[in-house]
Image: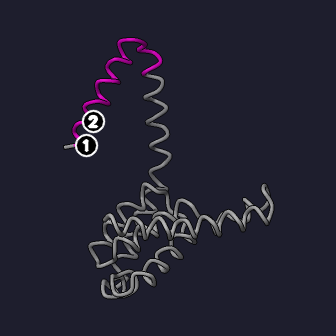
Amino acid sequence: MSTIILAGVTLIFIIVSLVKSPARTKSSMKNAVKTAKGMVPEVGGILLVVSVLLAVINKDLIAATLGNDNVLISTGIGALIGSITIIPGVMAFPLSKELLAAGASSVALASFITTLTMVGLATSPIEKKFFGLKFTVLRNVFSFLFAIIIALIMGVFI
């Protein structure tokens, strides 16, 4: 239902924009389509990799490593995976839904998504180059700790 509402509101704003400035709206729509076309290979590649991984990885393995047996261990594993993975946040949510269906705990998935967006081990060489080693290490360590805390707090509410 919310998707329908958002689509309707978007359509209304596009119509208002078309009435106010047709040329600018058409130009913006062309840019949006061009950007979307540019994203298709990247998003498609990520979807392909995620699909293959989910097909290959046994659901029992997912449940054992990210399941509810030991919240602290599964949360830590989820946080480590999120820290080293480079996936756009928009792709992390569908992946998390599939992992949840395969037996992962919501707390482990919260730590995965939180570290995915807050911790950047794969991008730390670039960060180190621009901000220095001390800043990069401190930011990643504190981000990791706060991500774990956030995930555990979310576990209370979920």
Q: Is the residue 57 above or below the residue 121 in the image?
A: below
Q: In this view of the protein, which residue sits in the foreground, 24 or 116?
A: 116
Quarter of the image that includes the N terminus: top left
Q: Nearer the viewer, residue 102 or 71?
A: 71
- Asked whether the residues under the numbered discs 1 and 2 touch, taking CB atoms below 8 Å apart as contact, a structural biologist would say yes
Q: Which residue is drawn at 45% across and 64% down?
A: 113
The total of numbered circles placed on residues is 2
- In the drawing, what numbered circle is on residue 54? none
The magenta stretch spans residue 41: no
Q: Name the residue under label 2.
A: 7
Q: Does the magenta stretch include residue 6?
A: yes
How far across and down, in percent of the image, does residue 23 sit?
A: 45, 15
Residue 56 in picture, x, y percent from top left: 36, 82
Q: Quarter of the image containing the C terminus? A: bottom left
Q: Residue at x 73, y 63 (%)?
A: 136
Taken as a whole, is the magenta stretch helix, strand or loop?
A: helix
Residue lying at the far top of the rendered structure: 20
Stretch of the chain drawn in magenta: 2-25
Residue 120 position, x and y percent, is 62, 64
Residue shown at 38% from the left, 18% from the top: 17
Q: Residue type at mark 2?
A: Ala
Q: Which residue bears the numbered disc 1?
A: 3
Q: In which quarter of the image is residue 47?
A: bottom left
| Label 2 crowd (10 A; few <14 / some 14-19 / many >=20) | few
Disc 2 is placed on an element classified as helix
Q: Which amino acid does label 1 sit on?
A: Thr
